[in-house]
Structures are given as structure tokens and as C-alpha cells.
Image (cartoon, grey):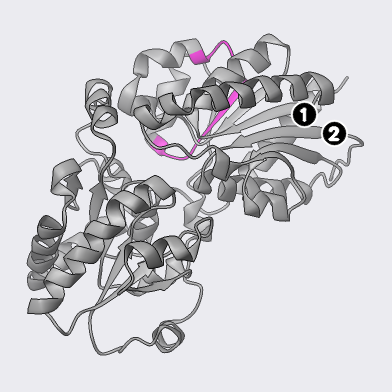
């Protein structure tokens, strides 16, 4: 039986592109079982389109790396204090934190201290940089919703109420159009190989990686004139940014089509590597950030790989080009080697298929929504 409540509200905080997508999916799913719930907080265009009252847009919060965060600390503290005031004023039934751990873990602690129920979706990657922090999180996270199966035991061992909900991308990751339509719409030749360029969803990522990817395309194009290159634009980014950084490259907003139909892709490290894996598309993972941020990251990150596809696989199934290796000559060389090795390409596709199988069944958003409903009902007298 569907329970419909009156005047319930949820504060939601999602500071990145992927968090906006996950938040929108959960909001849509919860509305099917409790349409009276209202939402406010931080998100992006998807959440705004569902009527979420955005106190801040996530584009104002997307800082990449330690150094960038330090530069924006005054603004971040203003946002933090503002949200705490909104918490007190609006008195939501639940606080939902989506990923974005640098901000959300601190906010969760303060929200719980003030007596609010807290739920987390898309676990902080403590398995990579801070397993010792898991026990501390038990004091201020009422329920953790994890998207990788290996995370469940990690939280359960520390006494945290945890639910493995499966990965949201399993359900949502599909092409926007069929292959024939994609090639026709983008002006590509279906008989020639396509290299997809996915430089990230944040401005700093795109500014660092796209020029190198474009230069790699120029290098490779000289020896392989049969190759076609197309750049995938993040929804939150202005097309003018891409035109300014890579004026000679074709750009499209249909990112999933690029992931699905490219023969090989250069992909910025992050959720996009997992999306590309779900399409079984061979890839090379690229990652480049401010030098100070990278050096600090090396001190705290304990996993041997940075790409989620490799982390889920438990081994290096796709190449990773990090920092100085995320440069045009290296990208071009790695692409050339991969394209020339058909057996390697097939092994990579097979390994990526196994990664997809580990991510669970479709329906993550619905499972999270049911869990949130349960938490809110539990708090109702």
C-alpha cells in the first residue's frame, strides 16, 4: 500500500554532475510512493527540472583537487553556514547526502548533531583513502546506501546500517539513439573507426585534458587518416568551452552514444569510465590535476588503480595515463597500440563485461527511495 504524507521535506546535497543524476533518479522513484515530499538543497539541472528548490546550483560547487578547494574555502564556508541555517529554518524530515564527501561528511556530522536523520547515497570512497574513518561515520550516518558489492562488508563491520542497492548506471546506461542514427546525425562514416574523447564533466578537467586529447587526435590522424574523432560534451558545460579548447574537433552532447559506438575512447577518470565499461567499449583512462593536489592524493590513496573500471575488476584491465603521462604523445601512442591489437581489444571487451556483471541488478533508485521512505516513516510518531 502506498503511504502518502503531508508536508514532508528532504534536504539533498549533490555537488557534482553524477550526483545530480543520481538525485533526480531517487526523487522520481520516491514520488511514485510518496508524492507529497518536497525537496531543497544543492543540485543541478536535472534536479531543478523536477522542482527541487536549489539553494545553490552544483556548478558553483564543482572544485577539482586539493588546491582548488583551498582557493575557494571562503565561499565553501559561506555555503556550509547558509545550509545549516536552512536546516534549522526548514526542519526537513531527512537529510540525503549524495557522494561529494569533502563537503557532505562534515555536513552530515553537523546535521546529525542537531538531531536530523541522515542518509548517504554513493559511499565516500573510504576503501581508497581512509578505511579508518568508517567507524567514525557510524556516529552521524543513519543509513549508508552503497553501489559496489565490496563496500557492504566494509560498513557492516563497523556497525553502520548499510544497504547494497546496486549501481544506478546498470539501469540508466543506454544509448540515446541507434547506431545508424548516431552516425548520420553526427556526420560520421559508419565504415571508418571512431575514437571517442570524454574529457570530463568539470571545467577544470576539461581544460586540462581536452587540449591533450585534441593534440593526440592530430598526431594520430597523420598516420591514421581513416580515424574519426568526436568529443562528448558534459550537459552542464557550455559548448563554447569545447570550441575554444579544441576548435578542429566535432563535439556532441550525446555522451552515451559516443560511449556506445566508439571503437575506442579516451576517458577522464571518474564515473564515465564505469559508463563506458557498461557498453563494453575499450578505453584508455586519463587523469590530470594540479601538481600539489596530485602529490597530496598520492599520500592518502591506497588503491593500486584510479579508474573505477579497474577498481571493480580488481586488476588493471584498461590502461591508465596519470599526470605527465596524460599527454598527447602518450595518448596517441597508446591508442595506436590498442587499435593495432585486435586480440587485446577483445580481451578488454570481455573483461569489461565481467565488470558490468558485478554491479548488480537494475533498480538502484527504487531501492534507495524505498529505504528513504522507511527512514522517514520510522521518524514519524
Q: In this view, does 41 lie above or below 93?
A: below
Q: Which residue is drawn at 23% across and 86% down?
A: 192
Q: In this view, does 234 lie above or below 16?
A: below
N-terminal of the two: label 1 or label 2?
2
Residue 7 quadrant: top right
Identify the residue at the far front of this view.
244
Q: In this view, does 370 lie above or below 115?
A: below
How far is mark 1 from mark 2, CA to CA? 9 Å
| Residue sitting nearer the eye, 164 or 5 | 5
Instruction: Please report contact status of discs 1 and 2: CB closer than 8 Å, yes or no.
Output: yes
Residue segment shown in magenta: 137-149
The answer to whether 277 is drawn above or below residue 41 in the figure is below
The picture quadrant where one finds residue 49 is bottom right
Q: Residue 376 carries which label?
A: 1
Towards the viewer: 270 or 278: 270
Residue 59 percent coordinates (x, y) = 55, 45
Q: Which residue is drawn at 24% across and 61% down?
A: 213
Residue 242: % across, % down:
40, 63
Q: Nearer the viewer, residue 48 or 208?
A: 208
- The secondary structure type at the circle numbered 2 is loop
Indicate the quadrant containing the C terminus: top left, top right, bottom left or bottom right.
Answer: top right
Residue position for label 2:
8
How many neighbours does mark 2 have within 10 angstroms: few (below 14), some (14-19), or many (20 or more)?
A: some
Amino acid at each position: 500500500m502506498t503511504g502518502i504524507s503531508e508536508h514532508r521535506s528532504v534536504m539533498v546535497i549533490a555537488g557534482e554532475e553524477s550526483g545530480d543524476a543520481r538525485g533526480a533518479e531517487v526523487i522520481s522513484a520516491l514520488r511514485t510512493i510518496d508524492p507529497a515530499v518536497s525537496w531543497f538543497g544543492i543540485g543541478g539541472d536535472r534536479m531543478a527540472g523536477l522542482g527541487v528548490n536549489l539553494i545553490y546550483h552544483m556548478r558553483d560547487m564543482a572544485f577539482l583537487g586539493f588546491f582548488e578547494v583551498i582557493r575557494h574555502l571562503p565561499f565553501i564556508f559561506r555555503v556550509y553556514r547558509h545550509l545549516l541555517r536552512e536546516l534549522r529554518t526548514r526542519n526537513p524530515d531527512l537529510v540525503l547526502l549524495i557522494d561529494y564527501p569533502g563537503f557532505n561528511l562534515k555536513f552530515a556530522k553537523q546535521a546529525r548533531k542537531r538531531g536530523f536523520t541522515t542518509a548517504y547515497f554513493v559511499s565516500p570512497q573510504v576503501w581508497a583513502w581512509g578505511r579508518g574513518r568508517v567507524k567514525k561515520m557510524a556516529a552521524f550516518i543513519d543509513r549508508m546506501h552503497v553501489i559496489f558489492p565490496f563496500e557492504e562488508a566494509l560498513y557492516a563491520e563497523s556497525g553502520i546500517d548499510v544497504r547494497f542497492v546496486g549501481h544506478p548506471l546498470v539501469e540508466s546506461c543506454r544509448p540515446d539513439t541507434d547506431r545508424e542514427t548516431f552516425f548520420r546525425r553526427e556526420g560520421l562514416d559508419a565504415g571508418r573507426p571512431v575514437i571517442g574523447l570524454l574529457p570530463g564533466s568539470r571545467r577544470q578537467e576539461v581544460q586540462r585534458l581536452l587540449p591533450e586529447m585534441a593534440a593526440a587526435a592530430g598526431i594520430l590522424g597523420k598516420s591514421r587518416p581513416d580515424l574519426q574523432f568526436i568529443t562528448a560534451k558534459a550537459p552542464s558545460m557550455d559548448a563554447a568551452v569545447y570550441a575554444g579548447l579544441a576548435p578542429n574537433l566535432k563535439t556532441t552532447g550525446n555522451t552515451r552514444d559516443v560511449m556506445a559506438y566508439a571503437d575506442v575512447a579516451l576517458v577522464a577518470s571518474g564515473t564515465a569510465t564505469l559508463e563506458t565499461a557498461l557498453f563494453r567499449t575499450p578505453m584508455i583512462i586519463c587523469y590530470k590535476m594540479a601538481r600539489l593536489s596530485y602529490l597530496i592524493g598520492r599520500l592518502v590513496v591506497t588503491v593500486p588503480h584510479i579508474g573505477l573500471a579497474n577498481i571493480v575488476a580488481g586488476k588493471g584491465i584498461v590502461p591508465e595515463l596519470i599526470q605527465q603521462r596524460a599527454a598527447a604523445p602518450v595518448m596517441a601512442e597508446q591508442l595506436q597500440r590498442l587499435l593495432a591489437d585486435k586480440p587485446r581489444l577483445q580481451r578488454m571487451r570481455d573483461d569489461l563485461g565481467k565488470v558490468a556483471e558485478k554491479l548488480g541488478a537494475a533498480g538502484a533508485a527504487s531501492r534507495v527511495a524505498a529505504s528513504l521512505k522507511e527512514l522517514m516513516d520510522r521518524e514519524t510518531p
